[in-house]
Amino acid sequence: MTPQLDAAHRMLTWFRENGGYIHPSTVLKPDPETGLSVFSTSAIDSDTRLVSCPFDLAVTAPLATLAICEVSGLKEDALVWPPGTSRAGEQWNERMRIAAYLGLHWVWIDRQAESSHLYPSVLRHWPYIESLPAPEQLRTPLYFTDDELRLLEGTNLLGAAQDRRKQWEEESGVVRDALKEVELTRERYFAAATYLSSRAFPSALLKIPENGSSTTTSAVNTSPDEESHPVLLPGVDLLNHARGQPILWLSANVPCPITSQPLPSISLVTTGPQTQDTQLYNNYGAKPNEEFLLGYGFVLSPNPDDTVILKLGFPSLSPAVQSALTRKALDPAKRFALRRDGEIDKDLLEVLRVVIGGGEEEVHVDEEDEHGLHDKEEKEMQLEMDVLGTVGQMLEDKLAKLENGPPEGLVDVRKDVRAMCNVYRQGQVEIINAALDKLETRTERLEKLIDQGMGECSCCG
């Protein structure tokens, strides 16, 4: 038995002792592609509960805050960014609180082993933390070697990974200084924050309607909730992701083997039958490979939900253009997504029409004024050609960077990391090529209309 599998079994014992449930026809075992995974030992019917985590076993920001304050002797109002930092005066975000809570477990386990310090009872998730993958098993870009990071050159992900490293480094310093825990190192903070990014569920699931009924959620239909924050659900997060997996997230009171009263819990319920000796999966919802690799450390191949993100960079915009964008409710700073169908985001095109057109308002022309109508039509056609040309150049530039690829001779590269980066890069290339094909068709159609005389004034010949 491997150390991780042994730790996972200890976690399941702790999990069940605290009201957790996992289907009896399941077993944990390593998988060469997905790591530690949950498999069925016999057939499981549809509409069956696979695993349940009681609400009070979840790792939440409020729970983390209470534990941090008790262990450190601080009041909650001390959990703020200090002067001289980038977010001076702001309260710690949920990631900082949960990462600090997880990190304090490591600190106190070490402290207990070295002396007779009494382990704080509020740090109650050690069996769970001990079962999580070791840092050397994590595969997000924060754990890439320098050579592996070069595999991302020319992609959006390289900048995103660098930004995340900078942000988390600053957060780890703020947490360490506030708690006065030098053993809560940057490496420990990175691991804890990565566990959160790769295993989190929305806190909105930890609610049951006031009438006491249940709430079901499909991962495919989840949407950002301003009142929700990331939480960790021991046991539930054992199941790996599979796109389109028939699964529901059930928030309900469920029977508990250790108490006569049902416990409010979050459960994974399969909506399709599962055969014997197959891996049981969760469904994280539709996400592009860029998000999977940055936050989770894996990619899907193929991934029909993959995207390429385009961002417009304007040094400055005139008051007329800014006014026109506001009037049309357009945001030039928006992240525009290209998808595998190659269609160009309508908002992207409209933003460029406004910017290239200088923010001019549409001029009304009398239908009897043939010269006026001709001028207007000609101007609109030229603007559209300019817009399509601008998008085409953006895509060509992005494609060139991707196709240039990383330099030859990179040595310190693990096989699985190279494979993931290749899948990610190839997906980006395919999406851009699909968009260029659609753009070419659209441009040719417009040129054909112009050649057929759509831009000529009938009375001038």
Image: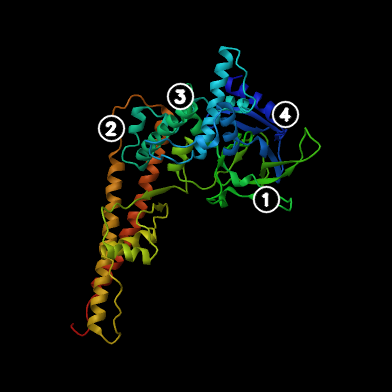
Mark 2 or mark 3: which comes first in sequence?
Answer: 3
| Structural crowding at the residue carrying mark 4, measured as other residues with C-alpha within 10 Å and reported as few (<14), some (14–19) or many (≥20) | few
In the rendered view, tell whether residue 10 sits above or below residue 357: above
In the rendered view, tell whether residue 386 sits above or below residue 167: below
| Structural crowding at the residue carrying mark 2, measured as other residues with C-alpha within 10 Å and reported as few (<14), some (14–19) or many (≥20) | few
Mark 2 or mark 1: which comes first in sequence?
Answer: 1
Mark 3 or mark 1: which comes first in sequence?
Answer: 3
Mark 4 or mark 3: which comes first in sequence?
Answer: 4
Measured Cα–Cα span from mark 4 to mark 3:
31 Å
Question: Residue at label 3?
Answer: 185
Q: Secondary structure at mark 2?
A: loop
Question: Residue at label 1?
Answer: 215
Measured Cα–Cα span from mark 2 to mark 3:
33 Å
The C terminus, quarter of image = bottom left
Question: Residue at label 2?
Answer: 407
| Structural crowding at the residue carrying mark 1, measured as other residues with C-alpha within 10 Å and reported as few (<14), some (14–19) or many (≥20) | some
- Residue, x 69% and y 26% (percent of image)? 13
Q: Secondary structure at mark 3?
A: loop
In the rendered view, tell whether residue 328 sits above or below residue 405: below
Amino acid under disc 1:
Thr
Q: Are marks 3 and 1 in contact (CB under 8 Å)?
A: no
Q: Residue furthest top?
A: 115
Res. 54 in view:
no
Q: Is residue 173 left or right of residue 26?
A: left
Q: Is residue 455 left or right of residue 14?
A: left
Which label number is shown at residue 17? 4
The nearer-to-camera label among 3 and 1 is 3
Measured Cα–Cα span from mark 2 to mark 1:
51 Å
Amino acid under disc 4:
Glu
The nearer-to-camera label among 2 and 4 is 4
